[in-house]
Amino acid sequence: MELLAYGDTGWGDELFFATLMTVAVAITAIFIGFLLAAIFASFKLSNTRILNLIGSFYTTVFRGVPELLVIYLFFFGSSGAVMYVAKIFGYDGYIEVNAFLTGAISIGIISGAYSTEVFRGAVQAINRGQFEASEVLGLKKKIYYYKVIIPQMLRLALPNISNVWQITLKDTSLISVTGLVEIMRQSYIAAGSTRDPLFFYSFAAVLYLFLTFLSLKLFNNLEKHYSKGH
Amino acid sequence: MDLMIESFPRLLDATILTIELTLLSLFFGVFVGVFFAVLRTSNIKILCCISYYYSYIFRGTPLLVQIFIIYFGFGQVEWLRESFLWIIFKEPYSCAIIAFTLNTGAYTSEILRSAFETIQKGVLEAAYGLGLNKIHVFFKIKLPIVVKQSLPAYGNEMILMLKGTSLASTVTLLDLTGVAKHIISTTFRPVEVFIVAGSIYLLMTFIIHNFVKILEKKLDYSK
Amino acid sequence: MNKFKRLFLSIFASIILLSTSVLADKIKIGTEGAYPPWNAKDESGKLIGFEIELANFLCIYMKHECTIVEQDWDGMIPALVMRKFDAIMAGMSITDERMKTINFSQGYADEVASLAVMKGSSLEGMDTPKAINLSTGGSAVNNALETLTAALTGKTIGVQTATIHQNFLESGDVGKVNIRTYKTQDEVNLDLAAGRIDAALAAAVAFTDYAEKSGKDVVLVGPTFAGGAFGNGVGVGIRKGDNSSAQGKKDAKLLKDFNKAIDTARKQGKISELAIKWFGFDASM
């Protein structure tokens, strides 16, 4: 227990902040993912063949290649890529792409590939007739999207979004390789410094279990909320 | 381009280890999965509980944590080092397989459990009514339904496991990802290596995907 | 009105001053933080070690503000090249291999490499000289390598990845050994103590430090190594500079500054003092 003391003598405070970092990265990543998913899901649903192809390419690659490999690509490649672009615009300095952003973007892109499928499935599941009904009722496109389609989509997609969230949360453990101090990285440092890996990795497992448990509860409540009237 | 051609044979070589790890883990994982799925349907509460928590823990924590506990964590346990089990835990190869097996086992048991639940009561009643005994019903009725029901989900799990084996590189094994990383960190050229290694992974996912599709068609008796 | 004008001007001036002090950029030094006693982390998460203290003194001599940045070992050189930081102080030996990609300052400390095993290992008591230098060669070195080859063939030896130690084992100077590479030296130590590997190769002080802090029976065996694949001491790694760009000029100047600061530190006995504090002996050079 001494090892977990809060303050300079133990690892309690470090692990606490690392847990917050894990949550922060995961939330940022899943929102980046949603953004990408909104784009690529509409690509996949569109009638243009080339857009379909781009959408499929995205989901196939990022669901088929190991997360770790994607992270290495961004970790070793991101600064170079950004600076290359900046050079075209005439700026020749160092641009820091910090570890948080590198991590959130790489996990977000992976998470987005899963979300794309979820969004697409949800839209397809909504009965065609509803689009027609809204049109007959004379609802404006915007209104029927916000009032009819999206609420239903959310209800249908929630269980799957919950799954994507769990995947995203667990994937954040892999960005420890980029140096961002989240749960896994902090446990790794503590395990190295105290030479007690069993304790610290087990404790990391407990922290992750706590987070997954908490988010499961949260999603259950959300699902209840959205299934009102059903 | 040169680097892509140059690194290809080395990456292909490492792919063998990736395939080995994937197949062995999936093979053992099916047994673990069936075992715990059957436990879960048991009427004895404690057995059911064990199965529930097993799958809960292994699905609720990252695979990276699991492999680190099994390799680096257990490596520090004195009595384990002195027991006969050390033959297994000494090697990174077997530690990786244990971690992957337990992980995929947890997911497999969930897939099988929900497949078991889809079997309609009426079907079983009819079978028993026809005078089939328990063993017959399990192998001739339950199992075919379960296999067919769980195939699509299990196909996804196979792909997840293939990707999961990339973590073997964190415990000194030189699998496809491990070698890719080694090349990246010595040549500082991530894009080329990513394209080659990524394509090899995608090819493997493609094969699994189509293999499962063909199997699904074969098992579709409704046609 | 005049008052306001003055106030406005002084605020304006202080903003300029403040922003220029930010613009007069700090030197960023990359270190691993996982290679005690060279560089490590304490319980409060603070970086400590020989190189951390030395870096602080060098920056004082250079009259430049510095920040020390953490970086995993296997991404150290790429991160320097990508300009994530400006200099490496991470127990990195000066080798021809690395000189292809980056520059080094003059050496500030000697890294003596050695094999380590657990007490009771069959590798104890090898009949070799105390130290060999691969650059000098000669029959004594050849004999020692032959003895090592005979003892080590088929054995599993752990090293940290992308190190001079890995290069040496891969060079085949000690025959065919099973090399197992780890991300950090901590992991090498853990697996050596666990008995997963027959021996490990690293800086001798990395093992003595581990043995002392963990209480494990880790002992050094065979000769200590220097020269050849082991390089010529530990120096500050800096990007290759040239006169073609502003950044290139800056890097070339930084190399000069570091060399001068190391001279000063040596003359004032700072390097020896810190070496004795962290290593227990004078490893300065």
Image: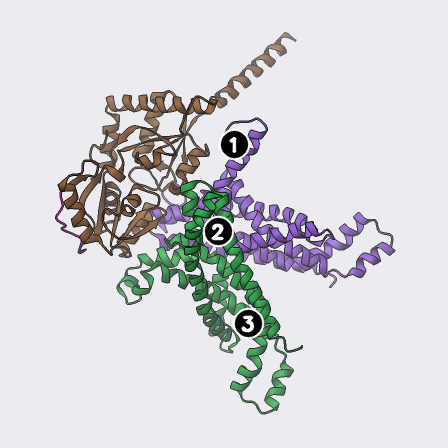
Chain letter belonging to callout 1? A
Res. B197 mark: 2
The answer to whether residue B121 is seen in the rendering is yes
Assess disc 1: are there few (<14), some (14-19) or many (≥20) residues with their C-alpha within 10 Å of its C-alpha. Answer: some
In this view, the residue farthest toward the top is C2
The answer to whether residue A182 is seen in the rendering is no
Residue C130 position by quadrant = top left
Q: Which chain is purple?
A: A
Q: Which chain is brown?
A: C
Residue A159 position by quadrant = bottom right
Do tags 3 and 2 sit on the same chain? yes
User: Looking at the image, is mark 3 or mark 2 earlier in the sequence?
Assistant: 3
Q: Amino acid at mark 2?
A: Ala
Image x and y of residue A211, in percent:
52, 54
- Mark 3 and 2 residues: CB-CB less than 8 Å, in contact? no
- Mark 2 and 1 residues: CB-CB less than 8 Å, in contact? no
Q: Which chain is green?
A: B
In the picture of the structure, the residue carrying the numbered disc 3 is B113
